[in-house]
């Protein structure tokens, strides 16, 4: 990563600390998945022990299955 234009440095070996995940970085998918997992837990969805990409919950008295694949979701009731 290069320092943004306008930042003058005396040392060319400076580093930047990112406060957010960059889209496309290794950590981006993990960060998104963690945030989505916490969101689903607020609605009492439970993560499958057999496959951590599958969640089971209830909506209006119906069982709901939700499957995650990278940043896509599939919902079935």
Image (cartoon, rainbow, N blue to C red):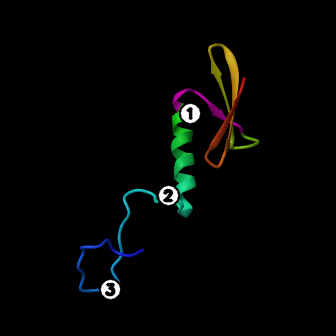
Horizontally, residue 51 falls left or right of residue 60, namely right
Specify few, some or many for label 1: CA neighbours under 10 Å numbering under 14, 14-19, or 20 or more: some
Q: Label 1 to label 3, Cα distance in Å?
A: 44 Å
Horizontally, residue 27 falls left or right of residue 7, namely right
The secondary element bearing badge 1 is classed as helix
- Residue 21 lies, in percent from the top left, at 45, 57
Horizontally, residue 69 falls left or right of residue 23, namely right
Specify few, some or many for label 2: CA neighbours under 10 Å numbering under 14, 14-19, or 20 or more: few
Looking at the rendered image, the disc whose residue lies closer to the viewer, 1 or 2, is 2
Q: Earlier in the sequence, mark 2 or mark 3?
A: 3
The secondary element bearing badge 2 is classed as loop
The magenta segment is: 42-48
- Residue 69 lies, in percent from the top left, at 68, 46
Q: Are marks 1 and 2 in contact (CB under 8 Å)?
A: no
Which residue is situated farthest in the right direction here? 50
Q: Label 2 to label 3, Cα distance in Å?
A: 25 Å
In which quadrant will I find the N terminus? bottom left
Q: Label 1 to label 2, Cα distance in Å?
A: 22 Å
Specify few, some or many for label 3: CA neighbours under 10 Å numbering under 14, 14-19, or 20 or more: few
Q: Which circle marks residue 50 in the picture?
A: none
Q: Magenta stretch: residue 46 in it?
A: yes
Residue situated in front as seen by the camera: 28 or 39: 28
Q: Earlier in the sequence, mark 1 or mark 3?
A: 3
> Residue at 36% of width from left, 67% of height from top?
17
Tag 1 residue: 40
Q: Which circle marks residue 23 in the picture?
A: 2
> Residue at 52% of width from left, 52% of height from top?
31
Tag 3 residue: 12
The secondary element bearing badge 3 is classed as loop
> Residue at 52% of width from left, 38% of height from top?
38
- Residue 50 lies, in percent from the top left, at 76, 42
């Amino acid at each position: 990563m290069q320092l943004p234009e306008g930042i003058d440095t005396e040392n060319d070996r400076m580093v930047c600390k990112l406060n957010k995940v960059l889209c496309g970085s290794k950590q981006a998918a993990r960060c998104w998945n963690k945030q989505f997992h916490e969101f689903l837990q607020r609605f009492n969805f439970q993560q499958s022990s057999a496959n951590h990409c599958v969640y089971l919950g209830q909506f209006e008295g119906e069982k709901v299955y939700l499957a995650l694949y990278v940043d896509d979701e599939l919902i079935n009731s």
